[in-house]
């Protein structure tokens, strides 16, 4: 992926138009998040990861999405309040977007195109089948809390399945590798 990922328009949680250009030169972990998901406690791990690695150049960028089981029904203000109150989230929380389907945000189109599959997928896909959620599209974002790792030069270097937690050794090692570059 070229530096163009930095030029894709996004909105901050307060609705202000922006882009990821302010994060050029940093390692980015882009995560689609939801407040009413079984994986929502990952907010705690994401915040800890952010606190521990921010000084080294890591930015965690959260994009709320309501694509999976209507688990993010709130407004941007409600989502921000939830994250602050329950998890003391300090990392950037952007406006709610769609991460798959016909109305997929251009940022997620670019991320998925650059990394069509989660290389570290765990048992999540099988678990979801048990709940009646099945996706034939192996390139689509599987669920809330899928993670895309972007290098300092804007390359999408890895994609992690939703059940790869923020403290998972594979994710931490990939982040540390990119921070060392």
Image: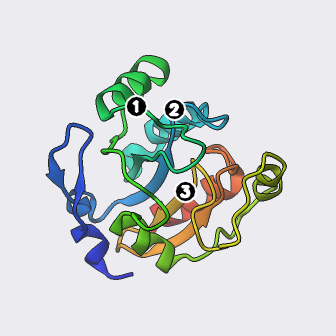
Q: Nearer the viewer, mark 3 or mark 2?
A: 2
- The single residue placed furthest to the bottom in the displayed view is 2
Q: Earlier in the sequence, mark 3 or mark 1?
A: 1
Q: Could one spot residue 180 in this view of the protein?
A: no
Please, is residue 90 above or below residue 128 in the view? above
**40 with respect to 84 (left or right):** right
Q: Give the structural element (helix, strand or loop) at label 2.
A: loop
**70 with respect to 93 (left or right):** right
Instruction: Check residue 147 in the rendering and tell me which mark sits there, or answer none.
Output: 3
Q: Where residue 18 sits in the image (x, y, percent)?
A: 17, 55
Marks 1 and 2 sit apart, C-alpha to C-alpha, by 8 Å
Please, is residue 99 above or below residue 144 in the view? below
Contact (Cβ within 8 Å) of mark 3 with mark 2: no
**124 with respect to 1 (left or right):** right
User: At x 69% / y 58%, what residue is drawn?
Assistant: 170
Q: Nearer the viewer, residue 153 or 6?
A: 6
Q: Residues within 10 Å of mark 2 (few under 14, many from 20)?
A: many
Q: Give the structural element (helix, strand or loop) at label 1.
A: loop
Q: Residues within 10 Å of mark 1 (few under 14, many from 20)?
A: some
Marks 3 and 1 sit apart, C-alpha to C-alpha, by 21 Å
What is the total number of numbered labels drawn onto the structure image? 3
Q: Residues within 10 Å of mark 3 (few under 14, many from 20)?
A: many
Contact (Cβ within 8 Å) of mark 3 with mark 1: no
Q: Earlier in the sequence, mark 1 or mark 2?
A: 2
Q: Nearer the viewer, residue 107 or 52?
A: 107
Judging by the rendered image, the residue that carries numbered circle 1 is 74
Judging by the rendered image, the residue that carries numbered circle 2 is 35
Q: Give the structural element (helix, strand or loop) at label 3.
A: strand
Contact (Cβ within 8 Å) of mark 1 with mark 2: yes
Q: Where residue 149 sits in the image (x, y, percent)?
A: 50, 63
């Amino acid at each position: 992926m070229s530096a163009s990922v930095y030029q894709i328009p996004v909105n901050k949680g307060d609705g202000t138009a922006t882009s990821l250009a302010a994060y050029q030169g940093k390692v980015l972990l882009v995560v689609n998040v939801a407040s009413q998901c079984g994986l929502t406690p990952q907010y705690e791990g994401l915040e800890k990861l952010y606190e521990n690695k921010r000084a080294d150049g890591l930015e965690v960028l959260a994009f709320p999405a309501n694509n999976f089981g209507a688990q993010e029904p709130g407004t941007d203000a409600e989502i921000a309040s939830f994250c602050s109150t329950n998890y003391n989230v300090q990392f950037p929380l952007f406006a709610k977007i769609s991460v798959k389907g016909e109305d997929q945000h251009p940022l997620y189109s670019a991320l998925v195109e650059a990394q069509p599959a989660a290389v570290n997928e765990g048992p999540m896909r099988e678990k979801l089948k048990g709940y009646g959620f099945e996706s034939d599209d192996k390139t689509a974002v599987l669920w809330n809390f899928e993670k895309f790792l972007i290098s300092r030069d804007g390359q999408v270097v890895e994609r992690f399945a939703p059940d790869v937690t923020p403290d998972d050794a594979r994710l931490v090692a990939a982040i540390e590798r990119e921070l060392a570059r």
